[in-house]
Image (tube, rainbow, N blue to C red):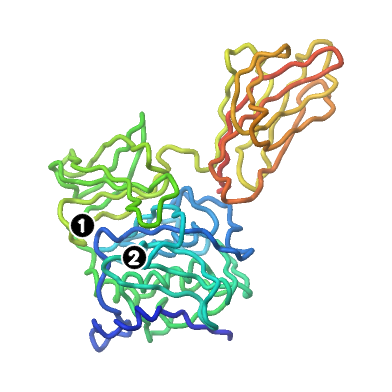
Amino acid sequence: MNKKQLLLSTVALGCAAMLLAPAEASFSTIGGSLGVGQRDIRVFNNFSDVGSNNNVRGFPDFPGALGAEQAIWKGAAEWSSAARSPSGGIDQPEIGNGGANFDVLWLGNANGVGGTNDNIVSAINTCGGGIIAFTETPISNGWKIRYCDNNFAFADGPANISTIFFDLQGVMTHEYGHALGLGHSTCGGATMLPSGSPGSEAERSISPDDINGLQFIYGAMSGIKPVISNVSTAGGNITITGTGFDAAATNEVWFTNGSVTGTSADARVRIFNVASTGGGTSITVAIPASAGMGDVMVKNAGGMNTDLSNAFPTTLGEPLFGASVFTNGSGSNPACFMSTSLPQLGQPFNMQVDASGHPGGAGFSGVLVYAGSALIPIAAGELLVNLGSPQYGFLIGPSGGGIDPYSVTPVANPSFLGAQATAQGFTFSLTSTVLCNAESITLGAAP
């Protein structure tokens, strides 16, 4: 079997003997641990392999992330205190098995590879031979993880990784183990074994030996650690339900950043001095404008491992799986257009135009699908698309005089997740053109 080493950087190897595990353990530690303010993870998505950004399937436990970003987020989240949901991933019963006072906050995308302590994952094309990935680990004040794109090809899954690729998610699970303070293990089946094989997905799920190492560093999950069990959004607010929140106005609420952030920035979106109600079981705050779908966490007063909650996934009310919303300007256009499926990356987006009301019968019908919206009165009605914006699609065909179906497939590119457009139907004959209503479209992921 083709096996290659997953190496720590020289920096990490240099401190490998500073903190040793008990003699009977197979895990090892490399010295130190991540402070409560260093539990974040970001990605600079410069992966060039053809398989690194193929996945456009959305997963509610990891909202807003596709491709390499979703795989990397999942890999880090495996070390979290408890499963994010019982459904897990396509090939994992659950993701999050650490049982320790340790949880990971997803902060989205960075605009560069960053420094050694900026907590950013990226690719590099100048690695020495045989290295799959490596972690630079000052430990207490952060880390940096690099995938060796020049040595090996990586795939984002989410399942059935070909033997010509290394699994992005499994490699991340291993490398993040180094970031949080673990060295290599000698225990068979451990994620922290020093080598991996192409096509293997086994490293995604941490073993009892890995868990023992995590708990040795951060302690077994304490009963006083705050726990988020549910979130809900309404009217621009988010309500966080759980246990163990401070009753006084000493809680902090942390969110994923909705923007691409600078490498050296503290990308957390934080609200300070928040009180809870219901005996420490409920917190309600306004959703910050800079927050995006991803994670929410609560930190109690203090800076101990037991003061930070689990990370709970939230879309903040945004449409993860796409949305089409009826719109009609001033309402003067006839309601003769509608979608019949959700607009999702890589999936047919089905629409229909009702041409039965066209004066004297329609010879043609069609759909204008453009980025941006408009409200431009013309002879045919109100033009509700912005023809000056980048074009997503323009469909036209002979009309049957009744319901005319149309379909377009948005490109299967993770970078278009959340892109917005306007689709408007129309009917046409030699004597007249009629503009229908429109729909505001948000591109989502297929489940």
Query: Looking at the image, which residue sits at the far left?
Result: 248
- Judged left or right of residue 123, residue 376 is right
Amino acid bearing label 1 = Lys
At x 54% / y 84%, what residue is drawn? Answer: 3
- Judged left or right of residue 62, residue 443 is right
Amino acid bearing label 2 = Asn
Rendered view: 300 above or below 369: below
At x 26% / y 37%, what residue is drawn? Answer: 284
At x 22% / y 69%, what residue is drawn? Answer: 219
Residue 171: x %, y % from top left: 48, 71
Query: Looking at the image, which residue sits at the far bottom?
Result: 23
Residue 334: x %, y % from top left: 67, 14
Does dot 2 land on a helix, a strand or a loop? loop
Relative depth, front residue between 318 and 254 = 254
Query: Residue 117's mark?
Result: 2
Mark-to-mark CA distance, 1 and 2: 26 Å
At x 28% / y 45%, what residue is drawn? Answer: 270
